Amino acid sequence: MQLQGIRVIDLTRILSGPFCTMFLADMGAEVIKIEDPKGGDPVRHQGEAPNGYSYYFASFNRNKRSITLDLRAPEGKDILRELLKTADVVVNNYRPGIMDKMGFGREALSRIKPDLVSCNVTGFGLDGPYADRPSFDFIAQAMSGFMSVNGAANEPPMRAAPPISDLIAGSYAAMGILAALVRRARTGQGEEVTTSLTDGLTSMLAFLATNYFATGKLPLRTGNDHALASPYGLFEASDGQVAIAPSNDTFYDKLLVALELEHLRERPEFANNALRFANREAINAALNEKVRQKPIAHWIEKLNEAGVPCGRVLNIGEVFDDPQTQHQQMRLTIEHPEHGRLDVLGFPIKFSDEPCQIHRPPPTLGVDNEAVLGQLGLTAEAIASLKNRGII
Amino acid sequence: MQLQGIRVIDLTRILSGPFCTMFLADMGAEVIKIEDPKGGDPVRHQGEAPNGYSYYFASFNRNKRSITLDLRAPEGKDILRELLKTADVVVNNYRPGIMDKMGFGREALSRIKPDLVSCNVTGFGLDGPYADRPSFDFIAQAMSGFMSVNGAANEPPMRAAPPISDLIAGSYAAMGILAALVRRARTGQGEEVTTSLTDGLTSMLAFLATNYFATGKLPLRTGNDHALASPYGLFEASDGQVAIAPSNDTFYDKLLVALELEHLRERPEFANNALRFANREAINAALNEKVRQKPIAHWIEKLNEAGVPCGRVLNIGEVFDDPQTQHQQMRLTIEHPEHGRLDVLGFPIKFSDEPCQIHRPPPTLGVDNEAVLGQLGLTAEAIASLKNRGII
C-alpha cells in the first residue's frame, strides 16, 4: 500500500486529528493511537453502539492500533519519547503550546528524531490573537464566513450539519503530512505541518470570497438557488423535488429540449443567463409547470439521457441503498473480533494498484499495549507494572 | 518546497481538478496547465474581473504555468505524449472513458511512462450505474445525502453555497496523488488515483451516517442546533447573534459560571445533556434571557476567558478584516505582470520549514507555450507554425 512502512504516532482525539490519521491508516501506514488509560478517546463513548462499540469511533479509527499511555506521568513521556524514535510522523490536535509544555515541542521533536514529520491541527492556527481560544466545528463554521453564505435569502445564516470544519482540517492535515513525506524522501528532513478548522473552511469559500475580493460586495444568501446561474436548484416533480443543475447555456438548451419546452428559446426575458437570473421566478415557474406533470424517476432518466446534470435529494438511508453508492462501496462491514459486525464509511480515494482496505479492525482500548511496548524492549513484567500503576 | 522537482501535467478545468493542482503548485510542484487554444479554462471567463482577469480563476490557478494545446489534433496529442514523458503526475477531471478515447487511458499512460501517477476526478466514480452521468456540485450535494441533513427542522433540505463537493474531491485528489508519490519513492511504480464529488461528500457525513448504520434511524434536520448536544447554537445578544458551542457537561458548567447562571445547576430538567436536549427550548430561553442583556463583544470576551467555545457569525467581509484571518494570511495580494493587483485566497496548510508561497502569478492563457515547448526541443519556427494552425 501507499504508506507501507510509515509509522504514525497518533496523539489525536475526537474528530479532526482522527480523521487525518484515518486516511494515513487506510493507505497502509501503521498508526499507533495513544489514548488516555482512563477511558481513551471520548468518541469511544459517543454515538450509537448497538454491539457495545461506538460506530462513530469505529468509522474514524479503523485500521489503527491502540495503546494507552498517561502522558502526564514521567514514565509515560519516556515511553512516548522511545516510540517517537521509531516513528515517521506524529500528529496531535491539542491547542497551540500544549506539546511544548509536555516537552514535545518542535525543537524537542527534532532532537528526538531529526527527520520526524509532525502535525498539529488547531481551531484557529498556531499563532495570532485567537490562537489560544477553544474552538469547535460550529464556531469555525461561524467565524470562517461559511455559515454567512448558507441558508435562504430571508433567513438567518445556516451551518452545515456534518462537522465539516473538523473533517476538512483533518484531510488537509493528511495532505500536508504526505507532502512533507515526499520532501523527506528527497531531502531527509522532517517538518512541522499545521492547519486549522477556521482556515480550512475559509479556503473553501471559492467564488464567494474571490468575487468579494474583486468588488468589495458581500455575497447574498440564495438558499438552494445558485448565486450565479439560473435556472439551477430544486424543481417540483409530481411526487417530490428533483435537483436540476444546467450550469451554462449549452446545458440550459439541452434542458429545454428534454422538457419539450423549446418554445422558451423565443422568450427574450430568458435569452441568456443574466436575464434568466433577473427573471428567476418566472423561468422556475415555466419549468415547474412542465416538471410537475411527471414523477421524479421520469425526469431523472429523461434528463440524464439528454446530458443535463440532475438527481434526487437522497436521504441518508437512500444514499446507502443507492446502487452507485453500493458500487463505490461507501458503506463497509467489518467483523470485529470482540464486538461482531460493525458498519463504517467507505474509502473516498480509490487507487488502481493498491486500493485502501480494512487491514485491522477498529481497536479495543489498549489492545496493542503488549505488542507495541514489547517492540520497545519492555518485558512482560515491566508492562504489567505500568498497567498496575495506571500508566498504561 | 515539498514538491520541488515534481512536474504535473494538468488537463483539468473548472473547479475540482484545478483545486487539486492548486495545492500541488502551492507546495512547489511545476504544474503545467494545458488549456484549449480557444479561450482556455472556462473559469477564465467567470467571476468578477476588475482588472480584466478573473479573481476566481486567479485563486485556483496561481503558481501554475499555462500552455495551450488542441488535444483533438494528432499533433496536439503528440506534444502531450512528449510532455507526459517528462512528468511525474497527470491529472484530469474528464468523465470516465474520455482519456481512453483520447488515447491516454491507464495502460497507454503506463507505456508512455511506467512510473507516472495519474488522477481522475469524476462526478460519481470511474464505474457503476451512474458513472457516465454528468454531474455538478449541486447534484453531488443532493445525491451524497449532504443536503438532506442541512436546514431547519420544518424546511426543505438546504445545500451549502460554496461548491464544496468540487473542493473536497479536489483536495482528496491531491491527497491521493501525494500518497501515490510516497509509494513511488519506495517502489518506483506509478498508480491511478480517483475520487468523486459524490463519494467525497458522502465520506463527510460523520456521525450522521454512522448513527444511521448503527440504528437504521434517519437523522433529523436540526438547523443550527446540534443533533446531539444541547445547548449549542446561536444565541441572542443585545446587538445580534452569537454562536456558543459548549459540547459537553464541563463546557456547559463553564458557560453557566460565565453567564452567572449557576442556579440553573439546580434545575432537574437541565441536569444532563439528554435532559437539556429534550428541553432545548427551555434551556435556550433561560440562556437567551441573560445573553440578551449585553452585546456580542461582551460575551465573546467573557466566554473565551471562561474557556467556552464561542464566536461571531462573520460575513465574508468581516472574515477578511478579522485580525486572526489576517494573521493567518488567508487573503493574499499578487502583483500580476499584466493585470496589476489581484487578491486570492491564502494557504490553509502551513509548513514550518518551507511554507507555501506565491512563486508564480496566475498565468495568462498560453504564456508558457514557448518555454515549455522549447524544452521539448521544438524550434521557434515549429512553435510559430503550431500557433498559426491553431494547435496551440
Image (spheres, coloured by chain):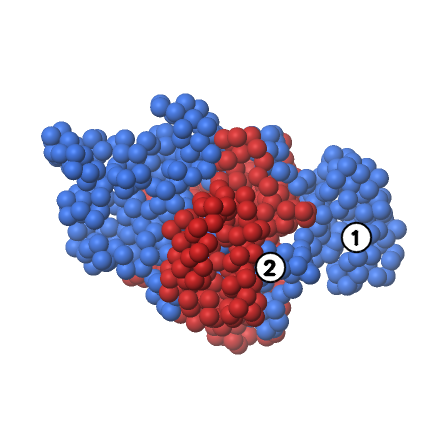
Chain colours: A blue, B red
Residue A5 visible in the shown view: no
Tag 1: residue type?
Asn
Say which quadrant the N terminus of chain B sits in. bottom left
Q: Which residue is mark 2?
A: A157
Tag 2: residue type?
Pro
Picture residue at 47% right of the left edge, 63% below the top: B311
Give how far across and how far down residue A213 sits, in percent.
56, 70
Picture residue at 70% right of the left edge, 50% below the top: A233
Q: Earlier in the sequence, mark 1 or mark 2?
A: 2
**The quarter of the displayed image where residue A386 is located:** top left
Give how far across and how far down residue B131 sits, in percent.
61, 36
Residue B210 or A387: which is nearer the viewer?
A387
Say which element carries label 2.
Answer: loop
A141 lies above or below A372: below
B30 lies above or below A361: below
Q: CA distance from mark 1 to mark 2?
A: 24 Å
